[in-house]
Image (tube, rainbow, N blue to C red):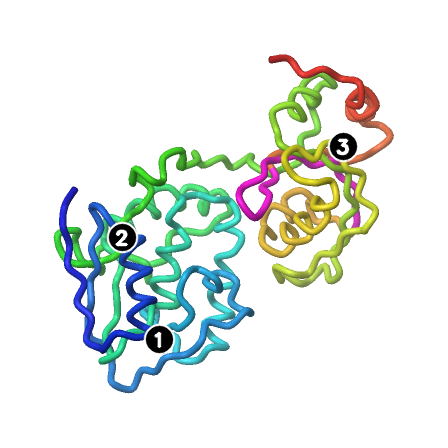
Amino acid sequence: MSTWLCRYPGRPGSRWQLLFLLCFWSAGTHAIYVDFVSSSSRCMTIPRQMPLCYGIGYTEMRIPNLLEHETMAEVIQQSSSWLPLLARECHPDARIFLCSLFAPICLEGDRIIKPCRSLCQAVRNSCAPIMACYGYPWPEILKCEQFPIDHGMCISTISNDTNTKGRTVPRASCRDCELDDASSAREILDTFCVNDFAAKVRITKRNMSSSSVSDFDMDSRVDVLKHGPLPRGDIFPRLQQWLDLDATCVQNIMRGTRTGTYVISGDVREDKIVVHNAYAWQKRNKNLNVAVKKWKHHRCRL
């Protein structure tokens, strides 16, 4: 285990405790890079309207940030565009990397912590292929060569720590979270078995011309086929959260329609759910109808 140094210019207090928390995340092979920023910068509370970084472990961020956003309104608007990618869980450290740029932790003395180049590269290598599935290249503003190399003091990857074993980096799949029209009843039943939950939901897009991440409504009458580790009553609020955070997935499922009923299934990941499979609920889809009717008495194969 390598050693590292965290230089802090202020006196012990609330900001010191926040910095200590970030340093705790960076234990082991990690390092903290502290750099100067413009003297005109200021500290601001991370608002609830910024779900990308709200509740990440510290409460104050510096503006302008490392992406040169100068107002909180601009930060909120720009950071929200990354929520669909974050919901795909393309890398376990993606949120830490993005928040180090959008909402750098606020230190006294006009100093700022930067991400390591290796952290950027790890997140880019895992997330860029998924972005490419939807036609978005890795942005030039996040070019990894601009960040310090690992023997400097910076925020490094945490996914290889002994206390984060079991965190896997998913492979990019351009078919992930899209309608499946060809599965047999047996294949659908097997999908229900391997996923944590399955439910039939009705989704409506309020404005067909809008691409807002919060422009979907879900009927409160959700038919829960399988609730897995969650209490049955928790499925609906988790699905509401999914509608807000994973707009790309919802749009892929709906395929440009305004309203539709779907049978969806997926996994429970900590405080949210991730949808893996979706089927359009239609009378002509006999395989899906048969699978749903058989599910109640179906025994999953080990």
| Label 3 Cα crowd, 10 Å radius (few <14 / some 14-19 / many 20+) | some
Nearest the camera: 3 or 289?
A: 3
Mark toward the start of the polypeptide (3 vs 2): 2
The residue carrying mark 3 is 225
Residue, x 34% and y 47% (percent of image)?
124
Residue numbers of the magenta segment: 259-275
Residue furthest top as drawn? 301
Work out how far the residue at label 3 is from the one at label 2, CA to CA, in angstroms.
Answer: 41 Å
Residue 167 position in % (x across, y down): 40, 37
Taking the image as shown, residue 151 lies to the left or right of residue 247, namely left
Residue 274 position in % (x across, y down): 58, 41
The residue carrying mark 1 is 62
Mark toward the start of the polypeptide (1 vs 2): 2
Residue 18, by quadrant, is bottom left
Work out how far the residue at label 1 is from the one at label 2, CA to CA, in angstroms.
Answer: 20 Å
Quadrant in the picture for the C terminus:
top right
Amino acid under label 2? Ser
Q: Are marks 3 and 1 in contact (CB under 8 Å)?
A: no
Work out how far the residue at label 3 is from the one at label 1, CA to CA, in angstroms.
Answer: 46 Å
Q: Which mark is nearer the camera, 1 or 2?
A: 2
